[in-house]
Amino acid sequence: MASILIVTTALLVTIAQGASYVDLYKNADYKHKLLRVEDIEVDHCYVFACDALDNTITSAKWGGLPEKTSKGDDAMISFYTDRDCREHNIWWRTKTQSDDDLYFPSNFRLDGINDQISAFMVWDTKKNLGGWLECVDPELENTEMSGSGNRTNSTVEYL
């Protein structure tokens, strides 16, 4: 019986991960989408590895992220001004995604980190278990994207 519970739990986590995403925007109020990072892994640092992303993010939205940690606390998403998810960060509860009055960071300027963000992480254990390098496809770099377009990960490598 315990093995069925473990398999079911692992399957649910995999399904939730597959539906998760973070959208990153160049301008305030979710304008000029730069990238959608999909299949977010908790406790992994997502590093902006190219000039088109590093220090250019002004707003962000997300969905499908876990809202509780494995200990039952509120899960958090943090945005960092360094590339190793250790320096100055600003965080939000991931449950923002299911609140009636969605409170996403619409303008990082208000938080004092506009055009300074170099990475993000969704926390579960508060331990950095690894990372991914993210970059924008150079052919799409100057393409205006808005709404929920189809631009997706350009994951470079696992750290």
Image (cartoon, grey):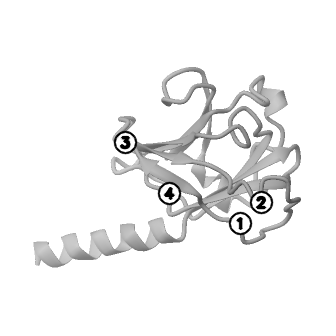
Report how far apart the C-alphas of labels 3 and 4 lie in the structure: 12 Å
Q: What residue is at 57 percent from the left and 65 percent from the top? A: 64
Amino acid type shown at disc 3? Gly
Q: Nearer the viewer, mark 2 or mark 4?
A: 2
Q: Nearer the viewer, mark 4 or mark 1?
A: 1
Verify CB contact (< 8 Å) between mark 2 and mark 4. Answer: no
Name the residue carrying label 1.
Answer: 151
Sequence order check, earlier mark of 4 and 1: 4
Q: Position of residue 108 (x, y in %)?
A: 79, 34
Q: Nearer the viewer, mark 1 or mark 2?
A: 2
Name the residue carrying label 2.
Answer: 140
Instruction: Name above or below for residue 8 compared with residue 136.
Output: below
Q: Quadrant location of residue 98?
A: bottom right
Sequence order check, earlier mark of 3 and 1: 3
Q: Quadrant location of residue 115?
A: top right
Q: Nearer the viewer, mark 3 or mark 2?
A: 2
Tell me the SS state at disc 2. loop
Q: What residue is at 83 percent from the left and 29 percent from the top? A: 109
Tell me the SS state at disc 4. loop
Amino acid type shown at disc 1? Arg
Name the residue carrying label 4.
Answer: 40
Q: Position of residue 1 (x, y in %)?
A: 11, 78
Verify CB contact (< 8 Å) between mark 1 and mark 2. Answer: yes
